Amino acid sequence: MHAAVIVFPGSNCDRDLAVAFERAGARVSMVWHKDTELPAGVDLIAVPGGFSFGDYLRCGAIAANSPICRSVVAHARKGGHVLGICNGFQVLTETGLLPGALLRNARLKYVCKPVHLQVTTAESVYTRGFDAGQVITVPVAHHDGNYHCGDETLARLRGEDRIAFRYVDNPNGSVDHIAGILSENRRVLGMMPHPERMAEPAHGGTDGASMFTGLVDALVAA
Amino acid sequence: MKARVHIMLKNGVLDPQGEAVRHALGSLGFDGVNGVRQGKVIELDLTETDADRARESVTAMCEKLLANTVIESYSVEIA
């Protein structure tokens, strides 16, 4: 399995994400935002957390219009897999690959702590390593993680089983406690919490590792 | 020519920053503020000299980058 991790100026979870994939058995290429082509044979693109372009204008907005993001969007439109974590989730909503937007946290505070997440669906390559309903612990670290979408979009997300993770104790005001969502074809996942920061014993827990091992197993078999 | 873009969160989208400002005003003794909405203003200096073309071009900029129309509305002033 070959994963590409996109690096923007201001990304700060890119190497953590690469290590999590490597530990799960993936080959990883780091791809700079000014590149226009993805490495040949990439199975999955990961858009990491951080503060791309200093969060200027809106979180993720400038990254979403960078040269490499045209290739990321094209990869997704062809049915490719794309994972966006934290700032990566914000980037994916800004590209339109995922619906809705991430607003300032309802209580205005930057929230940085481990949270309990309910795995809402196991029906995706990202969540197949978990059981539906399982509660896992992974950290969040964001100021703008308050997921917002219209009623119609929310009804679709629920009806199509596209809410991947919900907060057990909502830290940011997200509608319906949403922590992560899937695209219509279930191949694009965006989530605010950081599974890559809870992926080996030295992190204080390994709940996040199942996402990466599940992904590698699924995409190797495919 | 110059253009000025006003960007506001749409009605119905929670504006926690505006709410915090409203509370701060109340605690300073400014009574009677029912609501505060906070937005942003972007000023552009354009080489374009035709107002209609400038408006069209700035509108395209808003749709593509300056505003996120999922949560924000915008208006364009050409001067």
Image (cartoon, coloured by chain):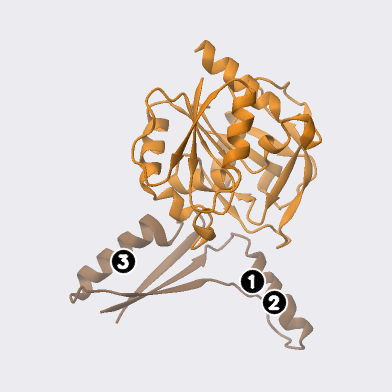
Chain colours: A orange, B brown
Q: How many marks?
A: 3
Nearest to N terminus: mark 2 or mark 3:
2
Q: Chain of mark 2?
A: B
Q: Residues within 10 Å of mark 3 (few under 14, many from 20)?
A: many
**Side (left or right) of A208 relative to A185:** right
Verify CB contact (< 8 Å) between mark 2 and mark 1: yes
Question: Is the residue at mark 2 from the same chain as the one at mark 1?
Answer: yes
Observer-side mark, 2 or 3, equals: 3
As drawn, the label of residue B58 is 3
The residue lying at 43 percent from left, 43 percent from top is A32
The residue lying at 77 percent from left, 26 percent from top is A134
Q: Residue reaching furthest bottom? A: B29
Residue A123 appears anywhere in the view? no
Q: CA distance from mark 2 to mark 1?
A: 6 Å
**Side (left or right) of A160 relative to B63:** right
Amino acid under label 3? Val
Q: Residue reaching furthest top? A: A221
Q: Residue reaching furthest left? A: B50
As drawn, the label of residue B22 is 2
Compared with A204, A146 (above or below) is: below
Q: Secondary structure at mark 3?
A: helix
Q: CA distance from mark 3 to mark 1?
A: 26 Å
Q: Secondary structure at mark 2?
A: helix
Residue that numbered label 1 is attached to: B18
Question: Is the residue at mark 2 from the same chain as the one at mark 3?
Answer: yes
Amino acid under label 2? Arg
Nearest to N terminus: mark 3 or mark 1:
1
Q: Position of residue A61 (x, y in %)?
A: 46, 54
Compared with B8, A39 (above or below) is: above
A140 vs A169, nearest the viewer: A140
The residue lying at 51 percent from left, 43 percent from top is A99
